[in-house]
DNA sequence: CGTGCCCGTCAAGAAAGCGTCAGGAGGCGC
DNA sequence: GCGCCTCCTGACGCTTTCTTGACGGGCACG
């Protein structure tokens, strides 16, 4: 879950922010001062920081710099001060966005989404690991028995479909349609050839596969 | 030099923006309509886009979507409309920032710097060192076998994309789109030529590359 | 015990992709 | 205008990948 650190000294606004964020299924943590914010961020690095500049204990810019010393987490600044100078100082200190109070909750949330989108912290976990081999879908890297293994485009495509349905049986027809297109749905030959290649490259004992399983008469299944 | 695309239909504001950007040593290009903006961006992919939402020929959101179809270049929206809904729509369509008119030039420039800072950074170090060569992204300097090497602008651009995705496979189409623009996504010739040039300039044995790796049928990969 | 079905394996030709070279066009400074 | 650099483009031979057919083994069933 996406973790948001809210740094706001005024209890009313802090509470409103927390409620709204949690309603959107963010994991929201609160800090009421700059020192506390830095401590919390260090203990549990957030995915995005919403920072009120007008804190009682520290200047807001110092908080930004304190964070920027070790993390590039997006920082969205809230501030009652609307002069250009204030914005320039905060943005150049390392803030990603600057919203003047009073602000609308919808706007804040939209800017939050924009900031999170950029970091690309998608919910995907594209690394699949088994006892025998490791597959990194994003980087298109595979390794087995400790050594890097090269897969051809078709092998990747086929394997991806199986991994997406990990544990589940994938019947031959959907498999063929997905990888080779609808015109090839009866070319079960291809499956035999390419499953064989995948096994030879990845399985410890290709003749007795443990992860790329044949379900006779039905299709194939990938199990971890 | 950093390339800024300014999309603004009103001549006075457009001129003011261009003057201010050029005074800060940005390479600023102007477009007065949405269609023109998309064409210019495709021909010469910019590093950041400043986009007025109130264009005569297209809805601003369409322009955002047209860009987001192929590039993740930062988009800073300018708009006379200050309602939350307008901001939410533009930001969720893919904009990175939203500034309401009238605005101060200093603020725009600060937000521009913030947007550019994000793209350049990441977990990158501006200096990449391998056993065979050294690349200083910031200073645009390269050296191999102890000697300085000159790379052309296109070679830099291509190499930067690969370095940003160090270790990860970059497929041909995204690579072509990023470096040459969306109209060139099938010109795989270019990749072959320029990868060859990079290898000849940087690899100890260009015929057997160790760092600029080809993944047949898929794309290319930079490994340290 | 024979037959048919399905699967795994192999190999060879076809197709697609890759590296390389060289020539020409266009831009830029002199 | 002239030379230099960069980019684009097409062609060629070579490598990798895909496709296709054939063969043999295991298994169920008659």
Image (cartoon, coloured by chain):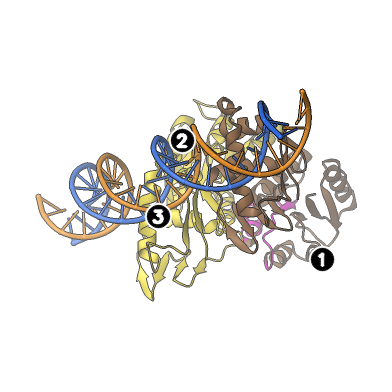
Chain colours: A brown, B yellow, C blue, D orange
Q: Chain of mark 3?
A: B
User: Relative to A20, does residue B200 appear above or below in the rendering?
Assistant: below
Which residue, given by chain and number where applicable, does mark 1 sit on?
A43
Q: Does mark 1 fall on the same chain as mark 3?
A: no
Q: CA distance from mark 3 to mark 1?
A: 44 Å
Which residue, given by chain and number where applicable, does mark 2 sit on?
B37
Q: Which residues are magenta?
A: A69-92
Q: Chain of mark 2?
A: B
Horizontal side of B201 relative to B123 (left or right) equals left
Residue A191 location (% of width, % of height) = 61, 37
Residues at marks 3 and 2 touching, judged by CB atoms closer than 8 Å: no
Which residue, given by chain and number where applicable, does mark 3 sit on?
B195
Residue at 56% from the left image edge and 44% from the top image edge:
B72
Residue A89 location (% of width, % of height) = 64, 59
Residues at marks 2 and 1 touching, judged by CB atoms closer than 8 Å: no
- In the rendered image, is residue B25 in sight? no
- In the rendered image, is residue A119 in sight? yes
Residue at 82% from the left image edge and 41% from the top image edge:
A24
SS state under label 1: helix
């Amino acid at each position: 879950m996406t973790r948001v650190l809210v740094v706001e000294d005024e209890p009313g606004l802090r509470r409103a922010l927390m409620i709204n964020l949690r309603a959107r299924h963010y994991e929201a943590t609160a800090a009421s001062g700059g020192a506390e914010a830095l401590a919390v961020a260090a203990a549990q690095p957030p995915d995005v920081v919403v920072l009120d500049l007008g804190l009682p204990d520290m200047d807001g810019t110092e908080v930004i710099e304190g964070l920027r010393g070790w993390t590039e987490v997006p920082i969205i600044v809230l501030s009652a001060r609307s002069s250009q100078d204030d914005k320039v100082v905060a943005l150049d200190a390392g803030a990603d966005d600057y919203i003047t109070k009073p602000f609308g909750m919808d706007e804040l949330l939209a800017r939050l989404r924009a900031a999170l989108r950029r970091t690309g912290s998608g919910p995907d976990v594209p690394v699949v690991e088994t006892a025998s081999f490791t597959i990194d879908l994003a980087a298109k890297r595979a390794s087995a028995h400790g050594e890097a293994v090269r897969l051809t485009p078709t092998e990747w495509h086929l394997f991806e479909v199986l991994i997406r349905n990990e544990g589940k049986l994938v019947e031959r027809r959907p498999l063929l349609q997905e990888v080779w297109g609808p015109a090839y749905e009866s070319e079960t030959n291809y499956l035999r050839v390419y499953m064989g290649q995948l096994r030879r490259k990845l399985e410890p004992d290709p003749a007795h596969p443990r992860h790329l399983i044949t379900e006779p008469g039905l299709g194939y299944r990938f199990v971890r």
